[in-house]
Image (tube, rainbow, N blue to C red):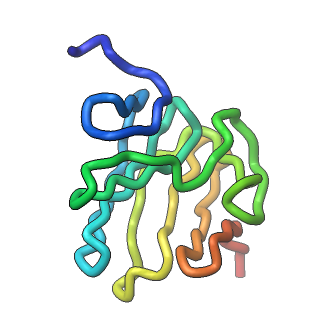
Amino acid sequence: NLFSFGDVDGKQYEAKLQHPLGVSWSPQNKKLYVADSYNHKVKVVDVEANTCDTLFGIGQSGDQMGPFNVAQLNEPGGLCLSPDDTRLFVADTNNHSIKIVDLVKGTVEKVRPC
């Protein structure tokens, strides 16, 4: 359904996204990371379990760093996974910044200028 969108984690067609933009595939973990722009979240699709769940982002725009349960984004757009699948780089569009997501520690931090 073209007009079925929202912010719902779940299995198969129960899951809903709103304006997903960037995607990045993890061949080691068999997971797909998705920038769910209008929900201000990054979601993870487990292709083996056929589920889509929030990785981080609380669903409100913001610019909060820290653990996944408090981290905030403002319309994430692009994603890039490190070669070792331990870090995800997120283009945080409306915060005009790049975030480094440590997938092992479960934390988000901002790239600092040199």
Q: Seen in the image, is 13 located left or right of residue 60?
A: left
Residue at image coords 33%, 48%: 51
* Quarter of the rendering occupied by the N terminus: top left
User: To which quarter of the image does residue 31 belong?
Assistant: bottom left
- Residue 104 in percent (x, y) is at 56, 80
Q: Is residue 106 above or below residue 32?
A: below
Q: Is residue 60 left or right of 31 when viewed as pictured? A: right
Please tell me which residue is depicted at 30% across the width and 11% down the height of the picture: 3
For the view shown, which residue lies furthest in the bottom direction?
84
Pick whichever, 81 or 52, lies toward us: 52
Q: Is residue 53 left or right of residue 2?
A: right
The quadrant of the image that shows the C terminus is bottom right
Farthest residue to the top: give it.
3
Task: Locate residue 84, reporting x and y percent.
Answer: 38, 88
Locate residue 108: give its quadrant: bottom right
Residue that appears at 37% across and 33% down:
15
User: Percent from the top left, x then y, of residue 83?
Assistant: 34, 85
2 relative position to 35: left or right = left
Q: Position of residue 67 (x, y in %)?
A: 73, 64
Q: Which residue corresponds to the image point at 58% horizontal and 38% vertical from the top-left?
A: 40
**Up-down: is 34 above or below 79?**
above
Count of number-bearing discs: 0
Of residues 47 and 59, which is closer to you in this image? 47
